[in-house]
Image (cartoon, rainbow, N blue to C red):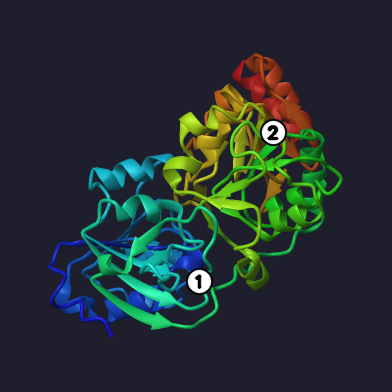
Amino acid sequence: MVDFGGLLQPGMGVWWSQAAAEPRPLVDQLLAQAPPLGPLRLFTGLSWNDQLAQSISPSDVMVSYGGLGALRSLGDTDQLDVVPCHYSALPRMFAEHRLPCDAGLLQVAPPDRDGMCSLGIGVDYMADAVEHTSLLFAEINQQMPVVPGSPRIPLTRFTATVETDRPLQEESSRAPGDLDRAIAGHVAELIDDGDTLQVGIGSMGAAVLDALAGHRDVGFHGGMITDGVMRLIDKGVVTGARKQVDVGLAVAGTALGSADLYARSADLPVLYRPTSYTHAPQVLSQLSSLVAVNFAIEVDLTGQVGAEVSRGTYLGAVGGQVDFARAAALTGKRSIIALRSTMRGQSSIKFSLDEGVVTTARADVDCVVTEHGIAHLRGQPLAERRRRLIEIAAPQFRDELAGAVRAAS
């Protein structure tokens, strides 16, 4: 048990690792001790801690780049402050202490013979935040793998540690459905052999990766490595042989998937790098073959993308969409936005964005894809963009969209 009482002061900011690298035992201990310590400002990204909403003290505030996983439930209690930002901005915001970084909680691999602990699959924003954090606490997990590229931290750098031997938490996403596969088929038409991919996560992302089984020499550079990428590595599809940088290697900040992915991560040709590398414009601009595939909630008839508001609730999570879309559109090969043509019985292709929040600007979108086809937007004026987007909208909404265009003319 770590005694945070003599180490943390009211008003301090504490961050911790996200997703499979979340140091759950340390987080639970911190939250159990938080009431007399508070108020605290807390920061994490994707959390699978289903007890978070019940455990967090009423005086504490959670800060994040989005309401992902268990953080979504905090939005209803006004304890979640979403910072709208590009993922590439996180390292700078930690450096400037705009995000909580007085203390950090990490999950690491056991120390090697030199007393160094690898961050394992949890590199991501954590590797950048470590440099600007005074107090570090570690869960030393016997099952955290040591992977290529992952930074190492001296055991002496940690103020306190706990030792565990537990499996990394698996990601439980919905399997791709028929609509996902139909959309993925169109996306696959836009990807050539030798291209370098960034693909969003979730069922549609998995479907896109599965649709590439017949491609060759594909590269990968993104925020997260998934089972879909692992399968393509096994099939000899993802080789990275034609990448302009990191040739022969997939690049990611963390792994998000199954126990098999975690168990094999040390042996896969994947380089784990911090956000200051994976999302950096100066790195992405070198990938002239970059194709970014991202997903949306809604797209308007000029190509503006909304991906932050769902059912009237602002969840944030701009994430890396704009980082990769802009790089792919300007210095890479192609920026793709994919979405289902309808959501909850309404058209996802809108005359104007219902939710009013533009995540990705229309100038950073080359193609929009639904199950009904592909709208090529690069170099097209507004009138032609509207026509092409109406063509891939759900058939039952096309006349309504066309009428809205005429009424506005």
In this figure, which residue is indicated by the disc labeled 2?
Answer: 368
Q: What residue type is labelled 1?
A: Met
Q: Which residue is drawn at 57% across and 22% down?
A: 330
Residue 291 placement (x, y as % from top left):
66, 34
Disc 1 target residue: 144
Q: Dividing the picture into quarters, in which one does residue 402 lie? A: top right
- 82, 142: nearer the viewer: 142
> Could you say which quadrant of the image residue 406 lies in?
top right
Disc 2: CA contacts within 10 A as few (<14), some (14-19) or many (>=20): many
Q: Can residue 128 be seen in this view?
A: yes
Amino acid at pointer 2 = Val
What SS does tag 1 mark? Answer: loop
Q: Is residue 264 left or right of residue 49?
A: right
In percent of width and height, residue 265 lies at 61, 63
Whether residue 304 is visible, yes or no, is no
Quadrant where the C terminus sits is: top right
In the picture, the quarter occupied by the N terminus is bottom left
In space, the residues marked 1 and 2 are separated at their CA atoms by: 39 Å
The answer to whether residue 408 is above or below residue 114 is above
Q: Residue at x 58, y 61 (%)?
A: 256
